Image (cartoon, rainbow, N blue to C red):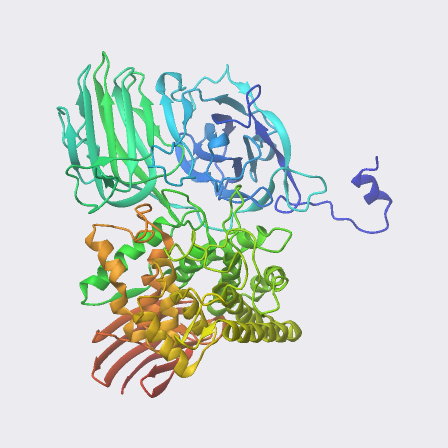
Amino acid sequence: MIFCNSIAQESPYKINLDWDHERHSWTAFWISPPEVSVNDYGVFLYRKSFEIEHLPDSFIVYVSADNRYQFFVNGHYITSGPARGSLMYWRYETLNIASYLKQGLNTIAVNVVNFGEYRPAAQFSHQTAFILQSETLGDLINTGISDWKVQKDRSYHARPVTSEMVLNKYYVAGPCDSIAARNHPWGWMDNTYDDENWRNAVIVQKGVGRGYMHGTPWMLVPRTIPLMNEKTIRFPGIARTEGNIESSSFFTGKDPLTIPPNKKVSILLDQSHLTVGYPVLVTSGGDKSLLKITYSEALYDAMGKKGDRNIIEDKTIEGYSDIIVPDGGKKRLFKTTWLRTYRYVQIDIETKEQALVIEDFYSIYNAYPFEQKATFITTNKLLSDIWDVSWRTAQLCAGETYMDCPYWEQLQYLGDTRIQALISLNVTGDDRLMRNAIKQADHSRIPEGLTLSRGPSYIPQIIPSFSLYWVAMVHDYFMYREDDEFIESCLPGIQAVLGWFERRMDKNDMLGGLDWFNFSDWTEGFACGAPSGVDQGNSALVSLNFVYALDRASELFEYFGNQTEADRYKKLADRIRLGVYRNCWDNSRNLLADTPEKKYFSQHTNIFSILTECVKDDTADYLMDEILNNDSLIQTTIYYKFYLFQALKKTGNADKYLPLLGPWKEMLKEGLTTFAEGDYKDRSDCHAWSASPLYDLIATVGGVKPGAPGFKYVIIEPSFGSLKELNISMPHPDGIIQMKLKRNGKKLKAAIELPENLSGEFRWLDNKIILMEGKQNFSL
């Protein structure tokens, strides 16, 4: 064998041997526990003690694990990770732990959990493993170079979430915990803990980045999103109890609750709103007691219905649950291994011979650190409430990835994600999670060209139209951000996606039958969410979805100088528009049918005929009226109303937006504190696509949108509806766009402030005003 060093010595060419950890070879190795299964469920505790004589100003470590880790320094919790990705793009965190170190003996402790066969669908895994590399002390603490101790925490067992726990509804967000405290090595994170009997971890694989010369299970890449927002949240009170209790305020952390020996007690807690995080229970005593902690979005009546979320009478809790068996010790702290989502939590307690003291019960909120920078100030309480509840919905559906819902799936579906990303841009100005989502979708593409419908996910699912929404999402980013290198890197993937559809064109100049799961909307008029003709061929809706993506792709390719491809996409889009109209327009009903057979007619197809300009001008205006008033059409659910509202804007009917918020109004009446998946299912109480009013109150009512790529120009075209005033601010890459508008009939007073270097135009009725950077006031 010829080694690289010998090549470097003999070759006349200079070869770079300084391989860095982001691209090629790390110094550290992945390490695993010896003599145990590294593929099955397990919680593993890693320790490394070391001496520091002089405290450094900076102490950088690079950390990752499979599946998940929680990282501690000298007993202080630092963070959890790694950020979710795939084996081909396995994330590591860069942490500066200098402020947690002290002179003398220090201990790094890491809790690594492998959920095994029960892992969330969004969790990739190769095997249980951990890696740490230090920039400061080098090999002194690098895994695989220095000795790390490890022990399996035998107090933890998986508690799989059964279909009975979740009322036979689809659930793929991972197991709960069953913890027997007697088997836990209490104090294992402390410097004083004796780990002499712990085993040394074994080397599994060298740590390497993408591009390494040999194959590797984990291709390490740096985390591209910030650490999660973590904070303590507490319950406001007890909703209901069964059995006598000695305290009504133990959840404050100041008034312990004592359960006498041989008693059964049930305590129902109401957080007052839905939230997500890591619940923490602190107990003393209570040896061999049994605690069951159940988490639910809502309570259920005898018919299995949720109803008004604020009403608890004659309702019971249903949901996944943790089991904890204390060992009688003092101040035992139990924290879940993964996120729990809940509004209601019920603690069922059965004590044995020793009284149990609940010292505290709270949760560590955990979500992406979005900051709300947009405002929509109004005297209309309904709109204020919709804004606030939409914002909570968006927050809970964003973690290390966007999530469709935090309770049931925690998956980054592209149909949901496009809406979430637009909310992020318009309300927070933070584009990092959007970039992360775009790239994760691009990396998920199968050899045929399509992206997965959701990713990361080790359970592949393909919804072809979601790949088209990914193309639209890249275009959205293109309009809001000047980031040419990133956008151009997506063009080959866009070509692959569009090529898959182009190869499925048929003689009618429409798409033929499509493979995979052809979901569009969960409306009753579609079979399992799929519109007519999509499986057999000639679906007008999905053909127009294709046109929608082609139009946006042609703009991207033209911008980046590939005029040939841009023109080809334009011609193909025009061909499909004509084919759909020729085959599916019904002269007797003056509507576009879902298929050439003209048996079914949906709002969805006619919405996209407007959005793609398959119909224009007076026909589009007529269709918009039919969409809003013809009840015989297959109706959109909350998800597809996002596109309905886009069609309102395109036809100049945005003033009709506010009266269409009925579904959101009804959810508020039902006591929801986040917006639900839809009115067709009694399932998810928090679903990303239902937060769309956050976008529309800015972009539809406020009428603020990019007027040129990179948001270098702004167009403001407000639609007041019944409102008399609009007071809106929105983040822009250069600052904040602010506007205060007041109308009286056809008269308008405006005060608008644009960030430096931003210009634009204001449109209202037949008026057009040029806007410049800075403050401007005018009347119309």
Task: Using the rendered image of the protein, determine whether residue 190 is visible from the camera's viewpoint.
Answer: no
607 shown above or below 63: below
> What residue is at 31 percent from the left and 51 percent from the top?
676
With 278 as the anchor, is 220 left or right in this view?
A: right
Task: Tell me where residue 474 appears, x and y as whole percent.
Answer: 52, 63
461 shown above or below 566: above
Identify the image quadrant of the C terminus. bottom left
Task: Tell me where residue 50 appears, x and y as whole percent.
Answer: 51, 27
Q: In terms of depth relative to the viewer, which is nearer, 215 or 256?
A: 215
Asked where in the image residue 774 lies, by quadrant, the reply is: bottom left
Q: In terms of depth relative to the viewer, which is nearer, 462 or 492?
A: 462
Task: Using the rendered image of the protein, determine whether residue 701 is visible from the camera's viewpoint.
Answer: yes
Asked where in the image residue 8 lies, by quadrant, the reply is: top right
With 739 as the anchor, is 497 left or right in this view?
A: right
> What residue is at 44 percent from the left and 34 percent from the top?
70
With 508 as the anchor, is 78 left or right in this view?
A: left
Number of dots carrying numbers? 0
> What residue is at 84 percent from the left and 34 percent from the top?
1
Task: Tell me where residue 346 appears, x and y as whole percent.
Answer: 24, 32
768 shown above or below 312: below
> What residue is at 80 percent from the left and 38 percent from the top?
3
Asked where in the image residue 626 lies, by quadrant, the reply is: bottom left
Task: Tell me where residue 306 appears, x and y as whole percent.
Answer: 24, 44
Q: In terms of depth relative to the viewer, which is nearer, 107 or 291?
A: 291
With 489 as the anchor, is 170 left or right in this view?
A: left
